[in-house]
Amino acid sequence: MAAVSFQSVTKTYLTPQGPFKALDAVSLDIEEGEFFGLLGPNGAGKTTLISILAGLARATSGRVLVQGADVQADYATARRKLGVVPQELVFDPFFSVREALRFQSGYFGVAHNDAWIDELLHNLGLADKAQANMRQLSGGMKRRVLVAQALVHKPPIIVLDEPTAGVDVELRQTLWHFIAQLNKQGHTVLLTTHYLEEAEALCNRIAMLQRGHIVALDRTSELLKASAGNVLVFKTDTALPPALLPKARVTGRVVQMVAQDAQEVEHFLAELRHAGVEVQDIEIRRADLEDVFLKVMAGHAPEGWEARVPSLPRDKAAA
């Protein structure tokens, strides 16, 4: 039995412009003990899918099961199995950190939970803030409390919706070390993030959403393997020639260009020399998850990709 099963989940919103389909027959299973990544651009449907899973929104059609419990028909059972960290910073300004965690324990009927609360405070770097009022905490500290609240009833399934958005490097490292430990102990983790290097490092399997459709679903290693190629990386203060602009990803002075083989790398360098572009700090690296993601979102899935998404028609897999 899957830890989480999305079965033909569709969500349609009524807008002044007419019906808007945020999710279109999304089906996928997340197995017990997996560290699963859900990726997609803003508006792809990631948060809508998680909201339906958490019972905060109702699917227009389809079912979601949490270890066999339907999130609508058996909401209480399904919700007890989930620990959800939302995107938004939601907190009660009248309680200290420890009081907030005790109240959260009570919501799930967990009493005498101070030993686990102490462990959470220690592992998330909140031990010295235990008696502080929530209003006194920085944004990063409030984010840590949200994680602790999601874990306080020891749920078997942890759902993280952009948990490291806008937080410092120290929190990111602390959080991922702790979550990875929980995953090794058997907890299932569902992660959405825009930090693709995190997804590549942590997730066993990844699904990519675009406009409410799953456009890629496979093991992380297979996604990277399917996008075999190299990336030419260099710095320049000179404008690129028009012929190379569509093939380049430019961030400030840093330019990245995906090349299928060494011959194409040499072709790019020759074009740059011919155009008089002065380049610095040249390096060639393997394609990473960000390169795969951009390729898929642009509608250029690697060869044979559609075979890994059997539930999707071919035209939707390239949407």
Image (cartoon, rainbow, N blue to C red):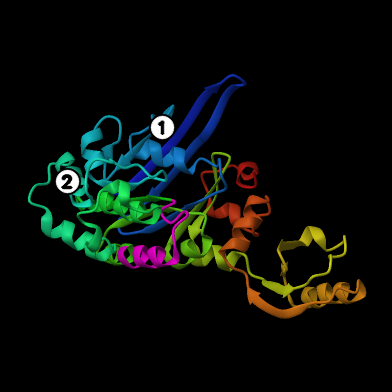
Q: Is residue 169 above or below residue 5?
A: below
Nearer to us: label 2 or label 1: 2
Residue 125 part of the magenta-drawn span: no
Q: Which residue is mark 1?
A: 62
Q: Secondary structure at mark 1?
A: strand
Left or right of 24? Residue 82 is left
- Seen at 22% across and 60% down, the residue is 120
Read off the magenta span: 162-178
- Seen at 27% across and 58% down, the residue is 187
Pick the residue in front: 119 or 308: 119
Q: Is residue 170 above or below residue 273?
A: above
Q: Secondary structure at mark 2?
A: helix
Q: Which mark is on residue 267?
A: none
Residue 285: give x, y in percent of width and height.
64, 76
- Please identify the residue farthest to the left as the structure is shown: 112
Residue 177 part of the magenta-drawn span: yes
Mark 1: give few (<14), some (14-19) or many (20+) Cα within 10 Å: some
Q: Which residue is mark 2?
A: 105
- Seen at 28% across and 48% down, the residue is 134
The quadrant of the image that shows the C terminus is: top right
Residue 271: give x, y in percent of width and height.
87, 72
The kind of residue tagged 2 is Ser
Residue 316: give x, y in percent of width and height.
61, 42
The kind of residue tagged 1 is Gly
Marks 2/1: CA–CA distance: 31 Å
Determine the image quadrant of residue 178.
Answer: bottom left
Q: Is residue 73 above or below residue 167?
A: above
